[in-house]
């Protein structure tokens, strides 16, 4: 079994690369200069050369606020790039694993966590581009594995934990939203469940998160507690940040469907955050 990983510089791709290297699994993770998924010619040539059995699409435009100013760029990667990759995967007989986002939802569900059958209704350009990417993959491929993620964190600097701890150590005034809820999700959990799903031949659309949910404020408090830091954090509403992109107030998704299918207990977000902070030197 050979894997091809896109978006090699991102934290999710890096987690797959580390796992594959540690287990001597056959894979390739081309640099973006060789594999830019928004470039159909380069993408086709790369898959033709690598001949993977499975393509893990970790490439994404994920600058949520900047996407409001440059939606064409977001859609170029998240929709057009996903379609191009799906076409290439179909042509070269590879299974595509595509990652999406909780931001396909508007946060207005009145009861319970979001499930796969709930209707998407994104509030911002980033969410619209991710939903368009899901649609593109399903239009091209009869069989694929689409996994929606939320609040992803892992090794690297482009995540909430790293940025929050940097501010805390610099003595900055700390505040976090108390009316924005989702599920912090560890890249190691994503890798674990993705590979198990592939082993079992799973296809379709699933929500893949750690278990439970929290506000950004609760997440920030858990980070400080695990690090033994006593900094004060002020809970504030999302509106206080005046961000360009509107975000859903509650986009927490249930991982129950994929957990039942895989017959696994997915760790809670608290366990995942603690495991990450114990493992990483931040």
Image (tube, rainbow, N blue to C red):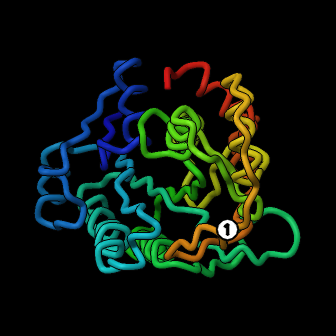
To which quarter of the image does residue 70 belong?
A: bottom left
Give the camera-side residue of 139 and 214.
214
Where is residue 51, by image quadrant? Answer: top left
Q: Nearer the viewer, residue 75 or 71?
A: 71
Quarter in which the N terminus is drawn: top left
Q: Is residue 205 above or below residue 35?
A: below
Q: Residue at x 72, y 73 (%)?
A: 107
Depth order, front residue of 91/36: 36
Residue 262, above or below 206: above
Mark 1 falls on what kind of element? helix
Q: Residues within 10 Å of mark 1 (few under 14, many from 20)?
A: some
Above or below: residue 104 compared with residue 188: below
Q: Please name the residue shown 46% across and 59% down the image.
A: 144
Residue 143: % across, % down: 47, 62
Of 145 and 275, nearer the camera is: 275
* Residue occupied by mark 1: 238
**Residue at 37 percent of width and 68 percent of height:** 78
Residue at position x 86%, y 75% in the image: 110
Examine the rendering and report whether any part of residue 58 can be seen: yes
What is the total number of numbered labels drawn onto the structure image?
A: 1
Left or right: 26 with respect to 45? Answer: right
Q: 281 left or right of 168?
A: left
Where residue 180 appears, as percent x and y from the top left, is: 71, 63
- Residue 155 at x, y percent in the picture: 45, 33
Residue 195 visible somewhere in the drawing: no
Q: Is residue 152 left or right of residue 64?
A: right
Name the image quarter holding residue 17: top left
Above or below residue 165? Residue 33 is: below
Residue 7: x %, y % from top left: 31, 49
């Amino acid at each position: 079994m050979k894997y091809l990983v896109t978006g090699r510089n991102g934290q999710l791709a890096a987690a797959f690369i580390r796992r594959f290297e540690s287990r001597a699994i056959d894979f390739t993770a081309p640099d973006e200069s060789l594999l830019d998924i928004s470039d159909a010619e380069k993408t086709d040539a790369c898959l033709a050369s690598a001949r993977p059995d499975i393509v893990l699409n970790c490439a994404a435009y994920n600058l949520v606020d900047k996407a409001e100013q440059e939606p064409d760029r977001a859609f170029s990667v998240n929709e057009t790039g996903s379609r191009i990759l799906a076409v290439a995967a179909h042509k070269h007989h590879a299974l595509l694993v595509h990652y999406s986002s909780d931001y396909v939802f508007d946060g207005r569900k009145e009861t319970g966590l979001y499930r796969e059958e709930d209707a998407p209704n994104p509030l911002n350009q980033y969410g619209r581009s991710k939903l368009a990417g899901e649609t593109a993959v399903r239009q091209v491929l009869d069989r694929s594995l689409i996994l929606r993620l939320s609040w992803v964190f892992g090794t690297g600097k482009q995540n909430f934990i790293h940025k929050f701890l940097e501010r805390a150590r610099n003595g900055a005034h700390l505040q976090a939203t108390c009316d924005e809820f989702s599920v912090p999700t560890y890249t190691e959990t994503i890798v674990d469940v993705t590979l198990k799903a592939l082993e079992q031949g799973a296809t379709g659309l699933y929500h893949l998160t750690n278990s439970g949910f929290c506000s950004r404020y609760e997440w920030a408090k858990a980070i400080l507690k695990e690090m033994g830091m006593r900094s004060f954090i002020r809970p504030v509403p999302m509106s206080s940040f005046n961000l360009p992109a509107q975000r859903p107030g509650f986009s927490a998704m249930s991982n129950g469907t994929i957990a039942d299918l895989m017959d696994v207990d997915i760790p809670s977000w608290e366990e995942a955050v603690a495991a990450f902070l114990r493992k990483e030197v931040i």
